[in-house]
Image (cartoon, rainbow, N blue to C red):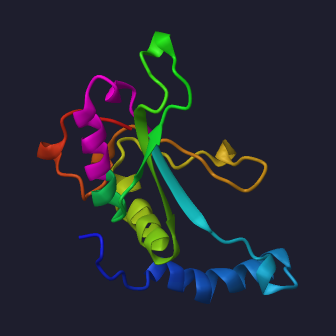
Amino acid sequence: MLKEKISLSSLKVKYEKEVKKRMIEKFGYKNIMEVPKVVNVAMNRGIGEATENPAALEKTIQEFILITRQKPSITRAKKSIASFKVRQGAPIGARVTLRGNRMYTFLEKLINEALPRIRDFKGLPPDSFDGRGNYTFGIKEQLIFPDIDYDMVDKVRG
């Protein structure tokens, strides 16, 4: 399932053929390399219940594979924190970094299929950029992705 061939995304083709040219005209870039581009998409989920319920971590891994078509890496606790009942090295989440065609395919799915499925969606907040060009936003439930089957979900996680 993870070895499937991913074709060139229509989002990437549109960016290369249309968006770059428009941005050069609009913002007056002198060099094609000045045009901003998406380099990677990082997805992560912290699972607070992972220490007591290892099945929650397995569910997250399966959901990430379905959503991104890439196996996530498991994040582990750097320190032991007694009040959270977490020991050093215990699995506490999962993350995946997408680049290239997988990134564009994921972005296309996010923009065209997932975000429109959010109830009362009014757009993404423009003030979520940090000072370095990174954009961050949270998703409250994994069910907005069409790859996730409603019957398969045991608990709604963001």
Task: Residue 37 in the image: state x and y as whole percent.
Answer: 66, 72
At horizontal 78% and vertical 49% (from top left) the residue drawn is 131
52 magenta-colored: yes
At horizontal 48% and vertical 12% (from top left) the residue drawn is 82
Relative vertical location of residue 15 with respect to residue 94 in this rendering, above or below: below
Determine the residue located farthest toward the bottom in the rendered image. 17
Span colored in magenta: 45-63
Determine the residue located farthest toward the left in the rendered image. 151
Quadrant in which the N terminus appears: bottom left
Relative vertical location of residue 70 with respect to residue 100 in this rendering, above or below: above
Name the foreground residue: 21 vs 75.
75
At horizontal 47% and vertical 46% (from top left) the residue drawn is 44
Determine the residue located farthest toward the front in the rendered image. 88
1 magenta-colored: no
Task: Residue 127 in the image: state x and y as whole percent.
Answer: 68, 44
Q: Is residue 32 left or right of residue 90?
A: right
At horizontal 51% and vertical 17% (from top left) the residue drawn is 81
Quadrant in which the C terminus appears: top left
Q: Residue 72 lies in what quarter of the image? A: bottom left
Q: Is residue 81 left or right of residue 121?
A: right
